[in-house]
Image: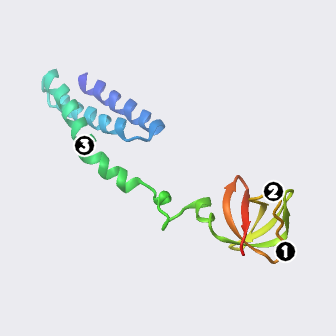
Amino acid sequence: METFIWIIVAVILGVAELFTGTLVLAMVAGGAALAAVAAALGLPLWVQVIALGGGSLAALWGLRPFLKQVLSTDSSSPSHPIGTKAIEGSEALVLEKIDDSGGLVEIAGDNWTAYPLEPDQVLEPGDHATVVEIKGATVIVWKQS
């Protein structure tokens, strides 16, 4: 019976981890699984609790840092930008006049609605601009000199 309870605790913690993404609850779930093994071996409750605590702490200090490093995306690294962050700082070719009411640019073969960084700036077709920021499906550009 105790084994079943520890397994339920481990599953609940594992599901809760899906919502937090911190890997803390997953490590405690691993400790609960270790306690379930202790219960299955017929060890007393105090040994099961020690297995829960010891397994959780060992996983938090030993396994969690390694997993965080492996699972981290290098989106904050400037050498490996991902998604829209990869577009920021790139060059855009103006296809349609850009003013405070918008315009159109081409970035790496894709067309984007664009607005100038400064409201009084006007970019003409054929001008080159730098993508400063992305807001939804539009880009904010700055005219290159």
Please tell me the numbered disc located at residue 119: 2
Structural crowding at the residue carrying mark 3, measured as other residues with C-alpha within 10 Å and reported as few (<14), some (14–19) or many (≥20)? few
Q: Nearer the viewer, mark 1 or mark 2?
A: 2
* Earlier residue among tags 3 and 1: 3
* x and y, in percent, of residue 12 in the image: 39, 30
Q: Is residue 93 above or below residue 33?
A: below
Outermost residue toward the bottom in this view: 126
* Residue for point 78% across, 68% down: 105
Distance CA(mark 1)–CA(mark 2): 17 Å
Q: Is residue 94 above or below residue 4?
A: below
Q: Which residue is mark 3?
A: 61
Residue type at numbered disc 1 = Pro
* x and y, in percent, of residue 119 in the image: 81, 56
CB of mark 3 within 8 Å of CB of mark 1? Answer: no
Residue type at numbered disc 2 = Pro
* Residue for point 23% across, 46% down: 62
Q: Nearer the viewer, residue 24 or 92?
A: 92
Q: Nearer the viewer, mark 3 or mark 2?
A: 2
**Which quadrant does the C terminus fall into?**
bottom right
Q: Is residue 6 above or below residue 125?
A: above
Tell me: 85 left or right of 53: right
Distance CA(mark 3)–CA(mark 1): 57 Å
Tell me: 139 left or right of 121: left
* x and y, in percent, of residue 40 in the image: 19, 30
* x and y, in percent, of residue 137 in the image: 73, 56
How is this picture coloured? Answer: rainbow
Q: Nearer the viewer, residue 98 or 13?
A: 98
Please tell me the numbered disc located at residue 2: none
Q: Which residue is mark 1?
A: 125
